Image (tube, grey):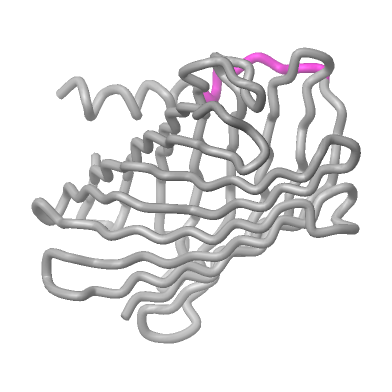
């Protein structure tokens, strides 16, 4: 019960989250996600994300991620994965990150009308070629999908990031908060695109940053 209530509390907190004075940046993020069902229980997820930053003029980050997952039942699955992340910010040095992570996915709600509420709790161990220490981070993702037509669904999610330790690349505590709203558009059987607006608020020691992002993700299941 506690496991199910925690992500609900995070979703409710979005409405009460304080407004921050922050620097603004316009981004374009593209993502491609493929889920491959090896068996009824075991699946593999592969993804690539390209994030164009600094008024969408340059590729500021490239993310390649993989996961092997196991379905405990129809509402609960867990997985372990690895991601390579190349971050090339203006000013600070380029970072090559090797990220290991574990995640738990739980369907919190599923109605006869097609409304779903899902949570994903992800624990990350972040290592960098340019650094010696390991950064631990917890992410709590909660997503709501609501049918708005015969073929389309409203998609909204929130995801706060919590740094569990202080290192050369993370400050500790709440570091990032993402909020998204968009609509699902089916392209073919088991293929959909989800365009929308994503706001990423980055908490920094100086002035915070707010990324206003045109986000387009392609999802495929095989």
Asked where in the image residue 20 lies, by quadrant, the reply is top right
| Position in image of residue 6 (x %, y %) | 31, 23
* Dominant secondary structure of the residues highlighted in magenta in the image: loop
Task: For the N terminus, give its image quadrant.
Answer: top left
**At 37% from the left edge and 21% from the top edge, which residue is drawn?**
9
Q: Is residue 129 above or below residue 175?
A: below
Place of residue 8 in the rendered image (x, y in percent of width and height, measured from the top left): 34, 27
Taking the spot 62% from the left edge, 62% from the top edge, the residue there is: 195
Q: Nearer the viewer, residue 25 or 154?
A: 25
Between 70 and 124, the residue placed more toward the observer is 124
Up the image or down, 13 lies above or below 71; here it is above
How far across and down, in percent of the image, does residue 81 sit?
36, 52
How many numbered discs sit on the rendered protein?
0
Quadrant location of the C terminus in the rendered image: bottom left
Q: Which residues are magenta?
A: 14-21
Residue that lies at the very extreme toward the front in this rendered image: 132
Does the magenta portion include 190? Answer: no
Q: Is residue 16 magenta?
A: yes
Name the residue at the bottom extreme. 188
Residue occupying image coordinates x 71% and y 53%: 61
Q: Nearer the viewer, residue 196 or 74?
A: 74
Q: Position of residue 7 (x, y in %)?
A: 34, 29
- Rendered position, 134 above or below 141: above
Taking the image as shown, residue 213 lies to the left or right of residue 139, namely right
Residue 64 as seen in the image, left or right of residue 212: left
Q: Residue at x 71, y 56 (%)?
A: 51
Q: Quadrant of residue 131?
A: top right
């Amino acid at each position: 019960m506690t496991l199910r209530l925690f992500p609900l509390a995070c979703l409710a907190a979005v409405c009460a989250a304080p407004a921050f004075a922050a620097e603004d940046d316009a981004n374009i993020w593209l993502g491609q996600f493929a889920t491959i069902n090896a068996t009824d229980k075991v699946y593999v997820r592969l993804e690539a994300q390209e994030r164009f930053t600094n008024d969408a003029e340059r590729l500021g980050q490239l993310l390649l991620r993989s996961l092997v997952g196991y379905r405990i039942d129809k509402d609960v699955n867990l997985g372990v994965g690895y991601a390579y992340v190349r971050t090339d910010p203006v000013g600070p040095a380029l970072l090559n990150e090797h990220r290991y992570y574990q995640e738990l996915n739980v369907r919190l709600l599923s109605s006869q009308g097609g409304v779903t509420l899902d949570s994903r709790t992800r624990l990350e161990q972040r290592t960098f070629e340019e650094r010696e220490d390991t950064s631990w981070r917890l992410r709590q993702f909660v997503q709501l999908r609501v049918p708005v037509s015969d073929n389309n669904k409203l998609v909204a999610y929130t995801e706060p990031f919590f740094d569990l330790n202080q290192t050369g690349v993370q400050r500790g505590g709440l570091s990032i908060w993402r909020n998204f709203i968009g609509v699902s558009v089916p392209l073919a059987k088991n293929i959909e695109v989800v365009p929308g607006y994503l706001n990423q608020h980055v908490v920094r020691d100086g002035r915070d940053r707010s990324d206003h992002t045109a986000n387009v993700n392609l999802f495929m299941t095989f």
